Amino acid sequence: MITRYVRICPNGHENPDYDTRCGSCPEYIGDIEPQRKRDIPPIPGSREVSDNQPPATFVPEAKPQLDSSATLKPQISVTKRQEQGHQLLYLEMTITGVKFPVRPGQVIGQEHPTSVADVLLPNVPGTGTDYIHRRHCSFDVDGDQWYITPLDQRPFGSDFTNPTYVNGALVSPGARAVVRSGDRLTLVNVTFVINIF
């Protein structure tokens, strides 16, 4: 029997387990636990798992490709990902408690209609999130070590680069800094706690 995991948005729409935004409405669903759905045909591009495999929770949706022939790569379970040495990193926004999953090579930035970041951070009024750049920084992994690289925002039309701090130390645009579980990442003045699993 094939088991598929889905995320149900607050409005009742069913979405693949790797989506972070509802495909039918603008609801954020990244923090909703995937639910099992049995005996149904698989969705093209989704992963199929047997009953004894855990769901890959909090795996963000891949960004749409410009090439129309491109397809989504199947997701693999957290256990399999850890066996391959690829840990998962989560940014927990301290003011809201919301966790944002980050995979190697992804860029994080402010949620905006023109943003091309892979991980979109929502604007929370009165918190300074509106000063996070739309392409603020990127994350990558070398072996088991995670790194953050603040992006120089001047090529994207900004006159200055909004600051990035790891544990209070400024990281210059283009510089690569080590990040570990428990570190505090501050983008402008918005703080996140890094959790690596």
Image (cartoon, rainbow, N blue to C red):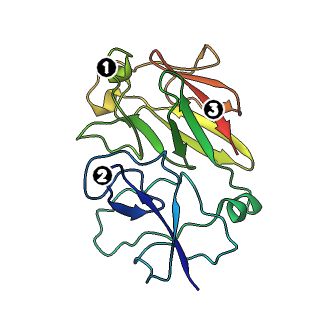
At label 1, which amino acid type do we have? Pro
| Residue in the foreground of this view, choosing between 70 and 120 | 120
Q: Is residue 119 left or right of residue 197?
A: left
Look at the numbered disc 2 and give the secondary structure of its residue: loop
Q: Nearer the viewer, residue 51 or 168?
A: 51
What residue is rendered at 28% in x and 71% in y?
68
Vertical placement of 149 versus 13: above or below? above
As helix, strand or loop, the secondary structure at mark 3 comes to strand
Picture coordinates of residue 140 (x, y %)?
59, 45
In the rendered image, which quarter is residue 71 located in?
A: bottom left
Query: Looking at the rendering, in which quadrant would you find the N terminus?
Result: bottom right
Q: Amino acid at mark 2?
A: Asn
- Circle 2 residue: 11
- 92 is higher (above) or lower (below) than 59: above
Q: Where is mark 3, residue-wise?
A: 194
Mark closer to the chain start, 1 or 2 = 2
Residue receiving disc 1: 125
Local crowd at mark 3 within 10 Å, few (<14), some, or many (≥20)? many
Residue drawn at x 36%, y 33% as measured from the top left:
122
Q: Nearer the viewer, mark 2 or mark 3?
A: 2
7 to 128, vertically: above or below:
below
Badge 2: how crowded within 10 Å, few (<14), some, or many (20+)?
few
Residue at 36% from the left image edge and 63% from the top image edge: 14
Q: Where in the figure is residue 64, as x and y percent of width and height?
A: 33, 60
Quadrant of the image occupied by residue 145: top right
- The residue at 32%/46% (across/down) is 27
Of helix, strand and loop, which one carries label 1? loop
